[in-house]
Amino acid sequence: MAMKVLLVDDEEGIRKVLGISLADAGYEVHTAEDGIVASQIVKRLLPDIVLTDIRMPGMNGIDLLKFIKDHFPNIEVIMITGHGDLRLAIDSLKMDAVDFITKPINNDILEIALKRATDRIKTRNKIGQYTRNLEELVRVKTRRLETSEKRYIQLFNESPSFITLQSRDFTIIESNNRFKEQFGDEPGLCCYQVYKKRLAPCPGCPVEKTFVDKKSHTAEMDVQLKDGSIRNFLIQTAAVTGPNGEVEHVMEMSTDVTMIHELQDHLAALGLHISSISHGIKGVLTGLDGGDYLISKGIEKQDASLVADGWEIVKEKIALIRRMVLDILFHSKDRTLDICPVDIFDFIQELATTLDQKLKKTGIVLILNTPPPGTEISTSILIDKHVLLPAFLAILENAIDACVAVKNVKKHLEIKIDVILPGNIASNNNTNSWILFKIRDNGKGLARTFQKEVFSLFYSDKGNKGTGLGLFIAQRAVKQHKGVINVDSVPGEYTEFTISLPV
């Protein structure tokens, strides 16, 4: 039987085109023009998958997702988002959306999202079937304990899940070997004491619900193992009835799904990562085409100035590719710091030399404000230069771009070094001295609402010209060095980044 898909979008064209594509893929397709209509169809149709736009009048996609998960948690939801709604898309994953795809919709990406949803449905069905089979075995054991005890105990103890049998007051009266290994075997404890270290039952307890209505219930929650680690469990219950049909005990089967969520988070982050840097790559390729054109024309016309201009463009794009690759490498994997003494003033001079050509080209004046001779300061600091140098360059290049964006103003960029004695940084309660690097520009500045987002992954106010990785990587590098990075800005006046590193 074909899976039922409800497609929700306020644009009729998208519903028609996407509906045809889904039907061709073998799905039974239903459509709705907004969230309110969709919520009514969901109650009547009970589709397997809902594919919904985030931005809609009336009830938007996020509200529809909440409604579905509150009332029909087994329905899988895939969000459709525009490029500007990525933050809402990430929030939807936290609300248990299975995936999200961006407009314009790529058929291959849509197919992957649908496969992820169908795989989750099939897995849940298999778990349900396994639970029903196990429930049947428990009923057989209750009726014919003498003949099936050995088989039941073996199945009970060798199950890969955590299984308990609980009484009406939630006392664990029996548990399998897997449960005892991870939670211990102390008699007389209740499930909420073991799982959550609580003094009372958890709100919405599935065991309590099963005692009330005799039905199987599911829940997902974080639990604490006896070693103190936190894991995410998918919990399913089944009623164990006596000869009179009343529920005497409830069997609770818990499956550790932590790795599944971690994989989903990783795949979601990877999708965002690829989506973001693809815009930067397109810009680089366009620039390389332009440089190639100028060089070819210069050779054809024997015009050295055209060749030089084209080569400058190519060099600039090569440098951008190098920086993007380093950003991707730093983001995709953790690396151990190679700490060694580095002279502070040599470090600053290397930054200045690296940026010299770009500063001359843009006409920005670099001001180095360093401690005067005789200041009591160690000239070296213990850092991994290969990690911090790209971090500082990312901040400085952002400052240069901010200055370039302002017209008819004498632009300058200042690097200032301050010495802070122990105890003078309130956020760091230790006895270290600190070196403060302040990078200040008189560019366009940042709005207050954006200052909190400036270090977020993929945040950029440069449109397609920025990858949104530079300042995220910079903050990560500073934190690796046990330092602190802050930003202060007044729109239209200045932006100042302060990097505090312990000596």
Image: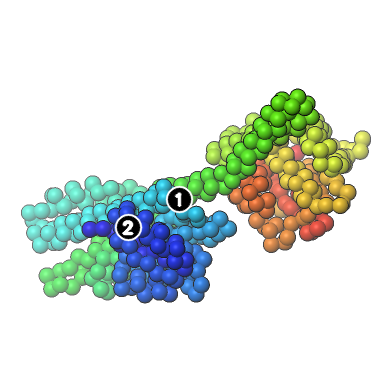
Corner quadrant of residue 356: top right
> Mark 1–mark 2 contact, CB under 8 Å?
no
Give above or below for 192 relative to 26: below
- Compared to residue 135, the image places residue 180 above or below, namely above
- In percent of width and height, residue 325 lies at 60, 36
Q: Quadrant of residue 251?
A: bottom left
Disc 1 marks a residue whose amino acid type is Asn
Residue 168 position by quadrant: bottom left
Among all residues in the image, which is located at the extreme front? 301
Q: Residue at x 65, y 56 (%)?
A: 453
Name the residue nearer the viewer: 400 or 381.
400
Q: Is residue 42 left or right of residue 348?
A: left
The quadrant of the image that shows the N terminus is: bottom left
Q: Residues within 10 Å of mark 2 (few under 14, many from 20)?
A: some
Where residue 60 sits in the image (x, y, percent)?
A: 49, 69
Q: Say which residue label 1 marks.
A: 106
Where does residue 124 sit, x and y in percent of width and height? 30, 56
Residue 23 — which label?
2
Residue at (73, 39) in percent of width and height: 393
Which element is circle 2 on? helix
Residue 130 is left or right of residue 387, and the answer is left
Residue 287 position (above or below residue 207): above
User: Mark on residue 380?
Assistant: none
Q: Is residue 218 visible?
A: no
Instruction: Specify the quadrant that holds the C terminus.
Output: top right
